[in-house]
Amino acid sequence: MSVLTPRRTLLTLLGLSLFLLVSAMLALSVGTTSISISSIFGVLTGNEQIADETTRTIILSLRFPRILLALVVGGSLSIAGATFQALLRNPLAEPYILGISSGGTLGAIIAITAGMSLPYLTTPLLAFAGSGLVMLLVYMLGHRRGFVDPTTLLLSGVMIGAFFNAIILVLMSVANQEIRTTFLWLLGNLSGASYGWVLAVGIPSLIASALLIFHSRSFNSISQGDEDAMHMGIDVKSVRRRSYIFASLLTGMAVSVSGVIGFVGLLVPHICRLLFGPDHRLLLPASMIFGGAFLIVCDLLARTLMAPSEIPVGAITAAVGAPLFIYLLKRDVRF
């Protein structure tokens, strides 16, 4: 892999942005009602002569906010996955496998079942609290003799995630039918997208992503070993602690609006690492953009493969991510 230069970084990110744009245009166009590219541009530019009112409603009220939410969720899970993989030096680490998504989901369910007001505030906050709690438990259990053991931490995450999933199932089994219906999005669903939710989770997610990208140089050193990073003057404990908080925030924001969408944080960073190299200065922003485009495409498949019925987007990502997870286990892939 060639040396990372500003020109290469710019060209790579521009190429990924173009892929994102194409994915978004395809998602705007394809569905139970097909819409021409000219009509899409007419709606987006405010040209009322090109598109009728029905087309404008489909694009602006249904598909466009859903695309924006897929961009936020996919980008958040991907950059969180890349961060966990760097800090734990394990390509199998990601929010879903570590159980952090389950913690965030439990927090969101508590907010919903308790009927808390201000859903744009309380649901993301409790989802973040749940994600942070799981991350804290996993981190504590992963310590052995004063050091973090990546294998122990990964297995602890799987077990804690299973425990939280059991609690979720209990809550769902005792909920009344009306509340149980609202839990469909917890299977991984973006159908509840709105501009309010995009703003509620998009702004904190963007800030957390920017802060993680700011630490990308430190991740390059930490991924090679804590001792090497400390010799380079990096406060490893401080960077790791802040990064865990930011990555947990990203996970909590994502699951608070979409439910559990697994394997995005595993699949996307791994693909970007294979394509663009392990330098986190490029890997993190590339994962964020590619992750958004990837989830847009997966959501497009989820709502069109069995139209007019809709498949949970989490099922689509799992169908792609689970075989890769097995492949990584069999090949014993390491940094």
Image (tube, rainbow, N blue to C red):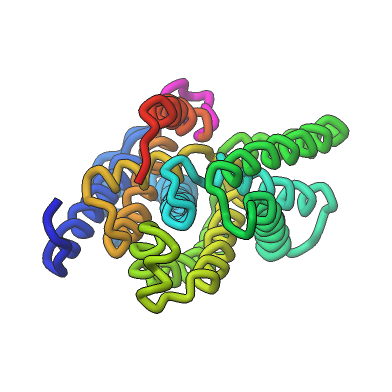
Judge whether 249 appears above or below 294 on screen: below
Expressed as whole percent of the image width and height from the top left, the position of residue 91 reads 41, 43
Judge whether 60 appears above or below 310 on screen: below
Q: Is residue 69 left or right of residue 33?
A: right
The number of discs equals 0
The answer to whether residue 212 shows anywhere in this view is yes
Whether residue 308 appears in magenta in the rendering, the answer is: yes
Dominant SS in magenta: loop
Residue extending farthest bottom:
233
What's the magenta region?
A: 301-313
Q: Is residue 244 left or right of residue 19?
A: right
Whether residue 16 appears in magenta in the rendering, the answer is: no
Residue shown at 41%/28% (left/top)? 320
Along the line of sight, which residue is nearer the eye, 217 or 110? 217
Residue shown at 40%/48% (left/top)? 59
Residue shown at 33%/54% (left/top)? 289
Expressed as whole percent of the image width and height from the top left, the position of residue 89 reads 43, 51
Along the line of sight, which residue is nearer the eye, 191 or 43? 191
Expressed as whole percent of the image width and height from the top left, the position of residue 180 reads 77, 34
Residue extending farthest front:
145
Judge whether 169 appears above or below 232 on screen: above
Q: Within the image, what quadrant is residue 299 found in?
A: top left
Along the line of sight, which residue is nearer the eye, 273 or 129? 273
Q: Is residue 77 left or right of residue 166?
A: left
Q: Is residue 54 left or right of residue 95?
A: left
The answer to whether residue 259 shows anywhere in this view is no
Expressed as whole percent of the image width and height from the top left, the position of residue 142 reads 63, 50
Residue shown at 79%/34% (left/top)? 172
